[in-house]
Image (tube, helix red, strand yellow):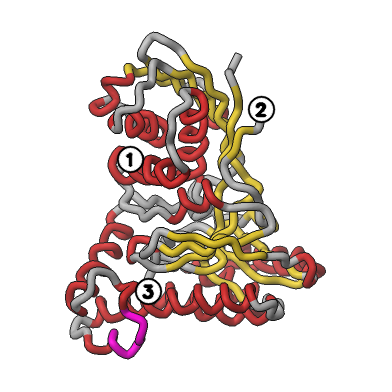
Amino acid sequence: MSDGVWAAPGRVNIIGEHTDYNGGYALPIALPHVVRCAGSTTTDGRVRVTSRQHEGERFEVAVDELADAPVSGWVRYPLGVVHEFHRRGHRITGATLDLDGNVPIGAGLSSSAAIECSVAVALRDLFEFPVSDAELIDISRAAENDYVGAPTGSLDQSASILCTADHALLLDFGENGHDQVAFDLAAAGLELLIIDTNTPHALVDGEYAQRREQCESAATALGVRSLREITDIRAVDTLVDPVLRRRARHVVSENARVLAIADALRTGADPRTIGPVLTVAHASLRDDFEVSTAQLDTAVTTALEEGAHGARMVGGGFGGSIVALTERDSTERIADAVEKRFHASGFAAPRWFVAVPSPGARRIS
C-alpha cells in the first residue's frame, strides 16, 4: 500500500530544439501522457523500485550505496533522482517506488524526464523536503546528466514540472525564466498531431554529446559564453569551420523562431501562421544540425503534402516523433497517409495521437 501517487508528464516542443544547453529559448507543452509513481517511505535505508512496464524486475539498493550501485538500463533514471536528493543532503530513510506510465519510450517525448520528475515530486512530498520547483528541475536534470550519463539540458524536466493546462511554456534558459503562453488550438479548429515514427532514439550515444560539444566550440570561436548571445544570424558566417557554422546557424535561427511563435500566440494571431515556421525549423534540424532520419523526413513531407499547415521533427533527433499542425477534420486522414507511406517505404508502422496542453507534475492521490 503506497502513501500516495504522483504523476509527471512527457512533453512535446512546439518549437525550440537543442537550444536549452545553449542558454536559449524553447516553447514546450506537457502531454496528457504521464509516468505515475506510487511511493511510500520506509526506515531501513533502502530504496526499492519496480515498474509495470518491466514486470518481474525488482531493484533494491541501500541509499548510501547508490553512487556505485551496479545497475543499468531504465532503473538508473529513478535511482538517479534518489541519489541526487541524498547527495545534496536530503535525508531519505528508505522508499518504495512503483512506476507505471504511458509516455511512449524512445519517441522524443521525454519519457525519461517524466520518470525523473514523478519520482522527484513524490520524494519531495513523502519526506516533506523544502525543495523549490527550480531545485526539483535541477535534481532531475542532474540525475539524467550525471547518473544516467545523458548530456541533456533542462528543457524536458522544466516542461514536466512547470507546464500548465491550455498553455505553452516559454522557457528562457539564459535567464532561468519562464512564462505561460495561452495555447488554445481547439478554438481555431486546429490540432497538434504527433506521429511517433517507431524508430527509438538513445541520447546516451555519442551523437548528442558531439552536437553539444560542437555548439560550445562555435560559441568559443565567436567569443561568447553561449550561442544565445548571438542574435544577428550574419555573425555565424564568420565561423571558418563549416560544421560549426551549420550547428550555430541552427541554434541562432531556432531561438528567433521560438520568440516569433511566442509573440504570435501572445498577440492573438491565427495559429495557422506558425505552421511555416515549424517547417523551416525541420529543415534547420535536418540540414544544419543533422539530427533527422529518413523516417522523420518522410513523415514531415507526407504530412505537408496532405495539407498540414506545418510539420517538423521533435526532440533530440536520430529517431522519435514529428509534430504537425493540422485542421481538426484532417488529422486522421493525414495520419493514415503517413502510415501508408511508411508501409510502402518498408518502415515500421508509426503510431499517432493528438497532443493537448496538459498540467505538469502533481500528486494525484
Chain-order first, disc 1 or disc 3 = 1
Q: Earlier in the sequence, mark 2 or mark 1?
A: 1
Residue at screen point 50% across, 73% down: 258
Front tag of 2 and 3: 2
Task: Classify residue 211 as left or right of residue 49.
Answer: left
Residue 140, image quadrant: top left
Secondary structure beneath dot 1 equals helix
Q: Looking at numbered disc 2 in the image, what kind of residue is underneath it? A: Ser
Q: Which residue is mark 3?
A: 251
Task: Calculate the distance from the C-alpha at mark 2 to the C-alpha at mark 1.
Answer: 29 Å
Badge 2 crowding class, 10 Å Cα cut-off, few under 14, some 14 to 19, many 20 or more, is few
In contact (CB < 8 Å): disc 1 and disc 3: no
Q: Nearer the viewer, residue 86 or 336?
A: 86
Seen from the viewer's position, the closer of residues 83 and 285 is 83
Residue underneath mark 1:
148
Residue type pointed to by label 1 = Val
Position of 243 relative to 47 (above/below): below
Q: Start and end of the magenta stretch?
A: 230-236
| Mark 3 residue type | Val
Please state the horizontal and vertical placement of residue 361, each as a whole percent of the image. 57, 42
Q: Residue at x 52, y 71 (%)?
A: 297
Badge number at residue 365: 2
- Is there CB contact under 8 Å for labels 2 and 1? no
Q: Picture coordinates of residue 181 (x, y %)?
A: 61, 65
Q: Secondary structure at mark 2?
A: loop
Mark 1 to mark 3: distance in Å?
25 Å
Q: Is residue 186 above or below residue 32?
A: below
The answer to whether residue 107 is visible is no
**Disc 2 from disc 3: Cα separation:** 41 Å
Name the image quarter holding the N terminus: top right
Q: Position of residue 46 (x, y in %)?
A: 37, 15
